[in-house]
Image (cartoon, grey):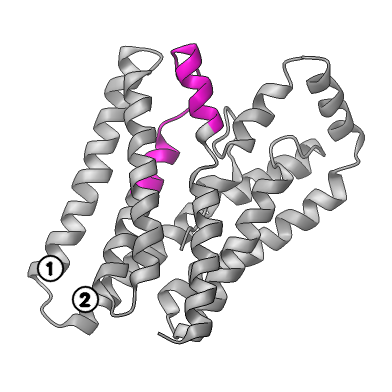
Amino acid sequence: MDSTLFIIGIIGNIISVLVFISPVKTFWRIVRSGSTEEFEPAPYVFTLLNALLWLYYGLTKPDGLLIATVNGFGAAMEAIYVILFIVYAADQATRVKTAKLATALGVGGFGVVFAATTFAIRELDLRIMVIGMICACLNVLMYGSPLAAMKTVINTKSVEFMPFFLSFFLFLNGGVWATYAVLDRDIFLGIPNGIGFVLGSIQLIIYAIFMNSKASQSSRETAEDGGQASEPFLASNDGYGQGEPSSSHGRCTV
């Protein structure tokens, strides 16, 4: 592997790890309270499936070690999040819903892709292409949440649901991995991360426009006073919004 490509891949790994551990504060809160409250399990399950598929892609593709390592870490983290969500589910219905979703997508969805590409496709290049297309398509679909988050900011004229550091790291993540993809001539890695870089740029521009708006200042003042407005910020800052979608729901971590 080219030394420049390797260095960029290492930087991408570090940034992606930061994105993967972003929900830790949310789950610390869940463990302390003993309840998942109003948090939704779907983002964690979808990100688990996403990480598993990219892990498989990295292991299948020659010189895909850096893609595999970061997504192996990501899959482990997301699996822990899903398990904690099941253990501390607010009620039995949420517990059952989470377990079914994790089984259908995390186990069933990945299992179908793995079995189909392993046993039905013998040619390595074709297998890599099919897995890459599935990974890229899933990532593009998951970018619906960042778009919804930006719409929320524009409608409310408040950046409460789109915290700066999360948007900034998603911007860096997309940019670094898009650069890696260009150097590695990997279109499947490049398309979703290129989209992520563009969306991250737009998020930062929108943040700059509305960060000093009256609505944003009001939210910050309420949070400092211990009011209820601090809760959505906490949720979205940790990566998965409570009520409103968060920008990291659609994150592409490779």
Horizontal side of 122 relative to 176 (left or right) equals: left
Please name the amino acid that badge 2 sits on.
Arg
Residue at horizontal 56%, vertical 30%? Answer: 25
> From the viewer's perspective, is residue 170 above or below residue 211?
below
Q: Is residue 105 magenta?
A: no
Horizontal side of 180 relative to 215 (left or right) equals: left
> From the viewer's perspective, is residue 136 above or below residue 145?
below
Residue 193 in the image: state x and y as whole percent. Answer: 53, 67
Span highlighted in magenta in the image:
25-48
Residue 135 in the image: state x and y as whole percent. Answer: 36, 64
Q: Which residue is mark 2?
A: 127
Residue at horizontal 75%, vertical 55%? Answer: 204
Residue 138 in the image: state x and y as whole percent. Answer: 39, 58
Please name the amino acid that badge 1 sits on.
Thr
Horizontal side of 5 relative to 110 (left or right) equals: right
Q: Outermost residue toward the left?
A: 119
Q: How many tags in the picture?
A: 2
Horizontal side of 120 relative to 134 (left or right) equals: left
Which quadrant holds residue 222?
Answer: top right
Label 1 close to label 2 by CB (< 8 Å): yes
Going from the N terminus, do you reach mark 1 or mark 2 first? 1
Q: Which residue is mark 1?
A: 118
Q: What secondary structure do most residues of the magenta stretch adopt?
A: helix
Secondary structure type for disc 1: helix
